[in-house]
């Protein structure tokens, strides 16, 4: 295991409804303060993907008082964490995504905006590591549609534009290399092979609208979990760091459930919050932790610790890639 100085910590968390609204102008809600002061700040992430920034971002036509409240909260988040924040635009639903970075770790950061028809447009930030300054690391925080399997597939396919940069640069020796890290709430399920969370028995689900949102009806009338988002990323050579930790490092707890703890009638525990890393970067992962956040959010947080030294070697392609689907066992 690497030392703290060698560690780069990635983190993912869907904070339910951004901790709630202000009780009065300028007064941040207690749940938000607990989230940032008790959960996020002590973990000291270097890169943080957030979802449901409902009160930290607004639409261009929002009232001035709403814009000021959003900017106030977003500024407070950056100051509490000691990190630089980025926000995507509000999409079809009022739960935008965000991303925070520790500027002492990365040598540069450039946000690229996506205006496609996402439920919540991804926050896409291109980073560079000082040890590999010519290698673009395309990172994104995403939140796929909760109620539409077809839209989730479309949103995942849009994200493969970032994955494609890894392939394009790698096949042309004259081009610079590139990496890709995508972390978010998929609102869908992992391919079941090798998973620790049992598959959902959809015949026992009483919330039938939720079943239609998250499962696919078969010709015989039975239902199976929607796993297409995971399949898309696996087909494109991306890898879940939790699977790397579980199946290559023996950390089975990395595959623990991230949601479903407080959703009666919806089938129980599920692992819908996941990361995807390219076939080089994922090999730098040394530990994955699912952090329980009961009482603060209906999603647990995920912490991914990487070796900075090994990541630099992988960005320079001094180590070869792992094969697509090779972590699904």
Image (cartoon, rainbow, N blue to C red):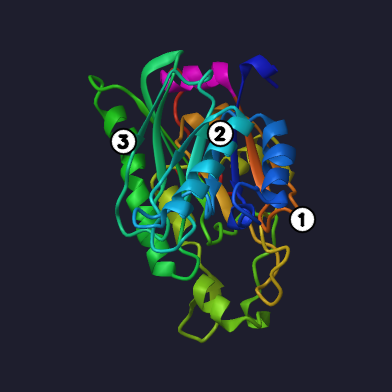
- Label ID, residue 78: 2
Residues in magenta?
A: 307-317
User: What residue does disc 3 label?
Assistant: 165
User: Disc 3 versus disc 1: distance between alpha carbons?
Assistant: 40 Å
x and y, in percent, of residue 113 in the image:
32, 43
Q: Residues within 10 Å of mark 1 (few under 14, many from 20)?
A: few
Q: Confirm whether the magenta stretch covers residue 72.
A: no
Q: Nearer the viewer, residue 174 or 137?
A: 137
Q: Residue at x 41, y 18 (%)?
A: 316
Among the 4 quarters of the image, the one containing residue 298? bottom right
Compare marks 3 and 1 and give the one earlier in the sequence: 3
Which label lies toward us, 1 or 2?
2
Residues tagged 2 and 3 counted as in contact (Cβ below 8 A): no
- Cα distance between the residues tagged 1 and 2: 23 Å
Callout 3 touching callout 1 (CB < 8 Å): no
Q: Is residue 166 left or right of residue 216?
A: left
Please name the residue shown 45% across and 84% down the image.
219
Residue 242, compared with residue 169, is above or below; it is: below
The mark lying in front, picked from 3 and 1, is 1
Residue at image mark 1: 295
Assign a secondary structure to mark 3.
helix
Residue 174 seen in render = yes
| Quadrant of the drawing holding the N terminus | top right
């Amino acid at each position: 295991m690497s030392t703290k100085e060698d560690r780069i910590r990635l983190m993912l968390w869907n904070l339910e409804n951004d901790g709630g609204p202000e009780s009065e102008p300028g007064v941040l809600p207690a749940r938000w303060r607990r989230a940032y002061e008790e959960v996020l700040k002590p973990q000291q992430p270097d890169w943080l993907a957030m979802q449901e920034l409902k009160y930290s971002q607004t639409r261009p036509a929002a009232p001035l008082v709403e814009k000021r409240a959003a900017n106030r909260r977003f500024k407070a988040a950056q100051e509490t964490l000691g990190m630089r924040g980025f926000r995507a635009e509000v999409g079809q639903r009022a739960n935008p995504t965000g991303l925070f970075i520790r500027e002492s770790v990365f040598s540069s950061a450039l946000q690229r905006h996506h205006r496609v028809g996402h439920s919540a447009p991804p926050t896409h930030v291109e980073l560079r590591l000082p040890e590999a300054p010519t290698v673009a690391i395309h990172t994104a925080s995403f939140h796929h549609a909760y109620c539409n399997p077809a839209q989730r597939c479309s949103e995942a396919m849009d994200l493969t534009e970032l994955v494609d940069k890894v392939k394009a640069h790698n096949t042309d020796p004259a081009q610079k290399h590139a990496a890709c890290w995508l972390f978010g709430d998929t609102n869908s399920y992992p391919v079941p092979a090798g998973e620790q969370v049992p598959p959902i028995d959809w015949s026992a689900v009483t919330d039938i609208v939720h079943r239609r949102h998250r499962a696919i009806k078969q010709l015989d009338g039975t239902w199976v979990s929607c796993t297409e988002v995971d399949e898309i990323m696996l087909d494109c050579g991306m890898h879940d760091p939790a699977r790397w930790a579980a199946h290559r490092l023996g950390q089975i707890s990395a595959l623990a459930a991230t949601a479903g703890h407080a959703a009666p009638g919806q089938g129980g525990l599920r692992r819908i919050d996941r990361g995807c890393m390219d076939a080089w970067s994922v090999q730098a992962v040394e530990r994955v932790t699912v952090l329980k956040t009961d009482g603060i959010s209906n999603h647990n947080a995920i912490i991914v610790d990487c070796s900075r030294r090994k990541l630099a070697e992988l960005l320079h392609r001094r180590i070869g890639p792992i094969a697509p689907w090779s972590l699904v066992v």
